[in-house]
Amino acid sequence: MIIETAERLSEADIAHCDFSFDIRSALVAPYRDPVGDARPVEPYRKAYAFDADDFAGIGPDRLLAVAREGGRLCGYILLSESWNGYASVDDFAVDRAVRGSGLGTRLMDRAVLWAREQGLPGIRLETQSNNVAACRFYRRYGFGLGGYDEHQYANFPALRAEVALFWYLMLPKAPPKAP
C-alpha cells in the first residue's frame, strides 16, 4: 500500500469505498477513558456525507494524503492549519476492508510529518462520543482529550445525543539544526 499526496478527491475516487462505521457504545462524561467510560447503545451503522468541494484546491497550506493499493483508494486524511495555529484533521477515513491493517496509523504518521514540516505545535481533531473506535485509536496514537462540547450538534435532531470531543496531539519541538 502506498501513501501519496493528492490535489483533489472526487466521488469517483471513493465510489467503491465503505467508510461507514458501527456504533455499539457511546462514551459518557467525563470522557477520559475510551474503554471504561463507554455505555452500550442500540447498534447502528453511521456514515458521513462526502463533499467533493472540501477536497478541491489542495495547495501548500493543506495536505491531502491518500492510500492506494493497486491503484484503488483505501483511505485518506485531510489537514489544514487551524485558526489556533494547530494542524486540523478536517477529514480522515479508512475503508472498512483494510481496517486493522495499520493504515490509519500510517496516514496519521503522514499528518504528523506535515504538521512538523509546517512548524506547527500539534494536531487537533474532532470526533463524537459515539465513535468509540476512533476515540480508542486516537488515544493509542498519543492524542489527549482537550475538551468537549455537549451543544455542538444540538441544532441537528439526529445528532443531539452526540457530544463533540476535541483531541490534541502535541508535537515536541525539533532540535535546532547544526550549523
Image (cartoon, rainbow, N blue to C red):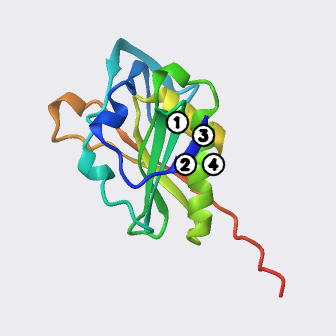
Q: CA distance from mark 1 to mark 2?
A: 8 Å
Q: Describe the element under mark 3 as helix, strand or loop.
A: strand
User: For the residue carrying disc 2, how many other residues have a C-alpha within 10 Å: few (<14), some (14-19), or many (20+)?
Assistant: few
Q: Secondary structure at mark 4?
A: helix
Q: Are marks 2 and 4 in contact (CB under 8 Å)?
A: no
Q: What amino acid is at disc 1?
A: Arg
The Cα–Cα distance between marks 3 and 4, rounded to whole angstroms, is 13 Å
**Mark 2, residue position:** 4
Disc 3 designates what residue? 2
**Label 2 sits on what residue type?**
Glu
Residue 49 appears left or right of 67: left
- What amino acid type should be assigned to the residue bearing mark 3? Ile
Please tell me whether mark 3 or mark 4 is closer to you in this view.
3
Q: CA distance from mark 2 to mark 3?
A: 6 Å
Farthest-out residue, top: 42
Of labels 1 and 3, earlier in sequence is 3
Residue 139 percent across, percent down from the top left: 60, 39
Q: Amino acid at mark 4?
A: Asp
Mark 4, residue position: 109
Could you say which quadrant of the image residue 42 lies in?
top left
Mark 2 or 4, nearer chain start: 2
Looking at the rendered structure, the secondary structure element under dot 1 is strand
Residue 171 lies, with reference to residue 99, above or below; the image says below
- From the top left corner, tell me how far across and down residue 178 is, in percent: 84, 82
Give the CA distance from mark 1 to mark 3.
5 Å
Tag 1 residue: 68
